[in-house]
Amino acid sequence: MWAGQSGWGGSSNKWDKGSEPMGEINVTPLVDVMLVLLIIFMVAAPLLTQGINVDLPDADAPAMQQNIEPLVISIRKNGDIYMQKHKVKLKQLAARIQAMRENNPKLPVFIRGDAKTQYQYVAQVMSSLERAGIKKVGLVTEPTR
């Protein structure tokens, strides 16, 4: 007899025919992958914010819950107007919004005005929105710090 055999002719190997395979799943690699994905999304999420960089005014208002991505019109302090990320002229604004709302008549419209924007620019944009048939407009603000 040699060292690996038992006295009755069988081996004491863990892969004997009489032993059952282990029925547990090793979840450590799954947890590792999920943590890496979580970190990637946490880093990438702030980079996905849309729009033009404006300094929003502060206000105490609750956050709105939206299921549809709204049409965001940004107004910089110098009066430049942007639809999403594309610069538009005030004269083109009503026609462009009407064209966008033909496909989606319930598309919400938000105005992001810089805190230092003159009221005249905001009033002109709101007038264009009214000409385009928009009755409800949301004003985007920052929560009070």
Image (cartoon, rainbow, N blue to C red):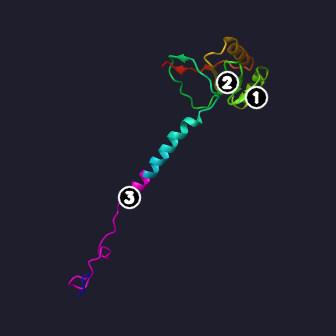
Which amino acid, by three-letter code, is at mark 2?
Ile
Residue 99: which numbered mark, if any?
1
Residue 84: image quadrant is: top right
Q: Is residue 139 magenta?
A: no
Q: CA distance from mark 3 to mark 2?
A: 50 Å
Q: For mark 3, does the 10 Å Cα neighbourhood hold few (<14), some (14 to 19), or many (20 or more) residues?
A: few
Identify the secondary structure beneath mark 1.
helix
| 76 or 16, nearer to the observer | 76
Residue at x 35% of width, y 63% of height: 23
Lower position in the chain sequence, tag 3 or tag 1:
3
**Residue placed under numbered mark 3 in the picture:** 26
Residue at x 23% of width, y 88% of height: 1
**Residue placed under numbered mark 2 in the picture:** 73
Highlighted range, magenta = 5-31
30, above or below 17, in the image = above
23, above or below 66, in the image = below
Q: For mark 2, does the 10 Å Cα neighbourhood hold few (<14), some (14 to 19), or many (20 or more) residues?
A: many
* Foreground: disc 1 or disc 2: 2
Identify the secondary structure beneath mark 3.
loop
Residue 18: image quadrant is: bottom left
Q: CA distance from mark 1 to mark 2?
A: 15 Å
Q: Is residue 20 magenta?
A: yes
Helix, strand or loop: magenta stretch: loop
